[in-house]
Image (spheres, helix red, strand yellow):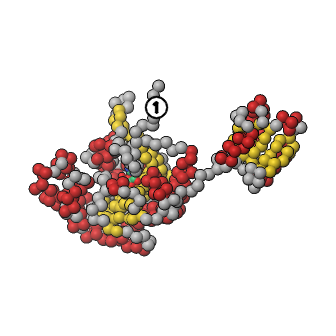
Amino acid sequence: MAEIAAPRGTRDILPAEQTAWRWVLETHRRVAESFGYRPIETPIFESTELFARAVGADTDIVEKQMFTFTDRGGRSLSLRPESTAGVTRAVVGARLEQEVRPVRVHCAGPMFRAERPQAGRQHQFTQLDVECIGERSPALDVEIIECAWRFFAELRLTGLHLQVNSLGSAEDRQLYRAALVTYYTPFRQRLCDDCKRRLDSNPLRLLDCKRDADLVAAAPLIADSLSDASRDFFAEVQAGLQAAQIPFAVNPRLVRGLDYYADTVFEIWHEQLQGAQNALGGGGRYDGLAGLLGLPPTPGTGYALGVERILMVARALDALPSAEASADVLVCSVEVEQALQAAGVARTLRSAAARVVLDVSDRRLDRKLRAAGKLGARAAVILGEQELAADSVVVRDLAARSQQTVPTAELLETVERILR
Ligand code: AMP
C-alpha cells in the first residue's frame, strides 16, 4: 500500500526541532510581555467575509490563496491567512478598548495560504503577532517595531534591514489611486490580465505585479500624494525610530499586500533570505480596519513575523540553541519480567519531579545505558533480580561512570544527589 505523506506545503515539527521552536516562541512571548502585551487566541477558521472585507476581495491572498470551504449549514469559512483581522474582530467585538486603551495583545499560531510551495513559502506556516488596538499615535508604531527589534536582538540575529514607508490617509490614497490610473491607462493594452482588472478595481495592487516590473519602477510614488498631516505623522515615526536607535531605510515602493494598512507600513528583511521571500515579517497601522468589519472605528497597529523564516536565518547564522535533554533518569530492569516493578520505581522518581523514562526493551544493559545517554539522562536506575530480593537497586551516575547498590529507601536521595 502506498505510504501516506504530509500534505503539500506542510511540515512536521519533529521532537529534535522543538527546542528551537520553543526558544523562538518563548523569547517572543517574553519580549512582547515586557511591553505589556497580553496573550490572545482566536479561531483558526473564520467567516470568509472577514478576510474578504479586511484583507480585500481583490488581493492575491483572498482571490487565490485562501483555503475556503462550506460548512454543513452552507456558510463559507476560510482557514485564516493572517491574524490581524481575527484579532481585531475579537478585541473590538468584545469592546476591550473601552476598558483599557490601547489593548495590547500578542499571539502565535498557524496561518494558511495556498501559494506555490518553495523554500520559505509553505501552505501552513506559523506567525508571531502583536497588535496594539484603540489608540492612534506614532509612538505606538515605534513601540511595535521596537518590540520586534528587541525580539530579534534577544535571538542574536544580525543582518536585519528595516524598511518603512507611509501609505497616508484614506484621502491620500484616493489621490494616489487617481495618479496611478492616469499613469497606467495609456499602457492598458500591454498589461497582464490581472493588472487590467486591478486598474479598474484596485490600482494600488498594480504595484504588486512581477511581470510589468518596468512599469512599476517608473510609477508615481505614494509620497507625492501625502497630505501635510500624513507627512508629519510619518516624520514622527522616523524620529521615534532614531531615538530608539533602530536603523531603518525609507522604501517609497513598500506598499504591503493587504488593503487594511494606512500610514505606517514596514518590513524586516534579512540578507540570508533570497528574492521575494526575503521578509522575516512586516506590519503597520490599520486605523480603517475595524470600520471595514462593521465595528466601531478603532485605530490599531501591529506586526506578523514568520517563525519558519526566522528559524531558517537562525540556522544559517548558527544561532540555534542546542537540543535539550529529554530525560533526567532512565529506569530499567535487567530482565523484561521485572518491567512492571521498574515502572513502579519510575513512578516514585517522577513524584520527586524528575523526568524519568522507562526502558522495557530486552536489549543488553550496555545498549540501554547508551540509549539513556542519547536522551541526555544523567542517572540510571537498574533493577536486577539479586538486588530486588534484597530490596535494593543499582543507581548509576552516567557522567561519572560510577555505580552503587542502595537500599530502595535511599533511592530518591541518591538520585537527587546525582542530578544536583
Ligand atoms: P505578510 O503579512 O504576508 O507580510 O507575512 C508576514 C510574514 O509571515 C512574512 O514576512 C513571512 O515571514 C511569513 N509568511 C508569509 N507567508 C508565508 C508562507 N507562505 N510561508 C512561510 N512564511 C510566510
Pick the front one: 348 or 72 = 348
Q: Name the image quarter holding residue 175.
A: bottom left
Pick the front one: 250 or 284 = 250
Q: Residue 169's spot in the image, x, y percent?
A: 27, 61
Pick the front one: 289 or 164 = 164
Residue shown at the point (35%, 52%) measured from the top left:
290
Q: For mark 1, does the 10 Å Cα neighbourhood hold few (<14), some (14 to 19), or many (20 or more) residues?
A: few
Specify the quadrant that holds the C terminus. bottom right
Residue shown at the point (45%, 35%) measured from the top left:
5
Q: Name the image quarter holding residue 388.
A: top right
Q: Is residue 276 above or below residue 162?
A: above
Q: Is residue 254 left or right of residue 244?
A: left
Residue shown at the point (38%, 28%) measured from the top left:
72
Asked whether residue 69 appears in the rendered view, the answer is yes
Q: Which residue is mark 1?
A: 4
Q: Is residue 366 above or below residue 203?
A: above
Kind of residue sitting beneath label 1: Ile
Q: Residue 143's spot in the image, x, y percent?
A: 44, 65
Q: Is residue 399 left or right of residue 161?
A: right
Residue shown at the point (40%, 39%) measured from the top left:
8
Which residue in the rendered view is the most extreme toward the right?
Answer: 390
Q: Residue 193's spot in the image, x, y percent?
A: 18, 46
